[in-house]
Image (cartoon, rainbow, N blue to C red):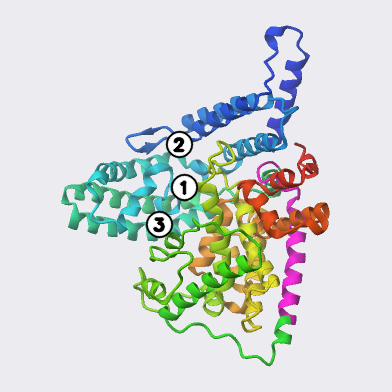
Amino acid sequence: MKIIVKNIIYLLFYGLIISCNSDNNIPSVKNKYQDLVKIFQDFRAIQKPSITDGVPDYSPKAMAHQKASLDNLQAQLGLIDTAGWSVSDRVEYHLVKAEMHGLEFYHMVLKPWSRDPGFYLQTQDGAGPTRAAYFYINEFPIKDEELTEARIKLIALPEVLSQAKKNLTDGAGDLAYSALHYLHYEIILYERIYKKIKEHHPELESIAAKALEAVKEYDSWLKENKSKMTAQAGVGKDNYNWWMKNVQLIPYTWDELYDIIMREDDRLLTTVAMERNRNRDLPELKPVSSRDEHAQQKIEALRHVMEFTEVESLFTIPEWIGFEEYLGGANALATGWNDAFANSYVGSGETSEWPGIRDFFHQTADREPLPEQTHEFIGHHLDHGYNRRDTRVILGAERQYAIEMIRLEGWAFWLEEMMMHAGYLDGKSARSREIVYWQAAFRTCRAVADLKMHSNEFSLQDAIDYVAECAPNGWNIPNGPHAWYEMQTNLRYVGWHMGMVIGKLAMNQLIAERIRQQGNDFTYKGFFEEYFAAGIIPMALIQWQLTGNDNEIKSLGS
């Protein structure tokens, strides 16, 4: 494997340096925290592609330059001696090291600029800043101060797609298959943009027409060239193991992760069957029948989980929690839930005919919204709020290469079941507990699909079909939007859904270790104050920060 070979070369290189007797050949060893901050800031700078007239450069020459810069920074990082540093500072050192490994993996394995046609699609987090162009679809007429930017982005798009055709020399078949699926929506998007621009900004009509034509040409080009894109999309077990160990800081191999997830799936399926046996005389939960009822239940769920966490002293809910931004502009205060607020939210921004497409998590939330709203609001929304207010240079920075994914998703997923055990469903039908287990079982389906796509046992379509077959109650639409979205994210972001399951289990491991340390002095409120203060970083680093135990980091060879 190229990454392993490269690391061996690095070790030999450093050994040669240390063995030299001449002072001129020995690089200076640094041990100041500020040296780490400087390296981190330089690392952030090299991640940004060079941009000319709005067009980011992902050419082979540009990527080779970025890789050389990364090699240099990794060498500098390797010369930092953290002896005598605080645990918190050493945690940041390993965080920077892991993120550098993330970019290394992108260059050595993923190479989306040369393997993934979807990398250049604006609806798929496209290359560089041009993806912002599609947001104008909901912002017409474009504000005067944004017209120049809109012009630049529209002019840049044909150049971005022209570059894509040159750069995609190692295209993977399944990634091309995914890109073609989403190009259908990309074309629809730019058709709408063109119509809006023609109506509101006729001076931009010609360049909007060229942008639309470029998207259509890219679709035609990809259809003509897809047969030449024969590389495997999955990274393979060895590379998966390297990514988990060196980037995600997870101490398990692909095979160990598969076994852990299957044992968790066994637990979930047997438990939900027992719940259903216990509830056999109760009526099944009925889904909501209207948009108004859906909105009202969502608001009631949020109100309930907020009050519950305060009463049970589980978390401190900050005043800045931000219901308005979470609910999409509803005018409400955290302490002022009322019918007027509910009425202001109902139907806002929702114009499609009810019920629309009801995929798996619509089906569960239409019956019991608490688990999903807890996951999204107390899980993700609270997390992001803390992160936006974190001013620390390294810990407060936006993480790269999905290094934060297992921490974010594991915590939010953990909440669904553990809040149930805490009692937040006690006043509801006992059938509500089934929803929690069904949601968890569906996530193990997606985790298995993740693993098997990257071991190249599943194609993308195999994975899409598998999660539809595996989903409880057949609630995942076969070949539907949810399956497509989640499986292509699995393929393009290694370990995404596997990480959700292992992250939930890592939460239990971390909390249990803290309980062993503190005994009867342990409180959830105290634990989560420490947990949020640690930042959005890999779980192994949070464990080290909170417990002082660095065994897991050492087991990773760091």
Observer-nearest of 65 and 200 = 200
Please state, as top left, top right, bottom left or bottom right, where the N terminus lies in the image.
top right
Q: Of the numbered discs in the image, which one, if any, rests on residue 58?
A: 2
Marker disc for residue 227 = none
Dot 3 falls on a residue whose secondary structure is helix
What is the three-letter code of the residue carrying label 1? Phe
Question: Residue 183 has which mark?
Answer: 3
Marks 2 and 3 in Cβ contact (< 8 Å)? no
Q: Is residue 419 above or below residue 355?
A: above
Q: Does the magenta segment cover residue 258? A: yes
Q: Position of residue 213 (x, y in %)?
A: 29, 51
Say if 163 sits above or below 197 in the image. above
C-alpha distance separating marks 2 and 3: 20 Å
In the rendered structure, which amino acid carries the disc numbered 3?
Answer: Leu
Give the class, few, some or many, for how many residues have Cα within 10 Å of label 3's Cα (few <14, many ≥20). many
- Residue 119's disc number: 1
User: What range of the chain is rendered magenta?
Assistant: 246-274
Q: Residue sitting at 47 percent across and 52 percent down?
A: 226
Q: Secondary structure at mark 2?
A: loop
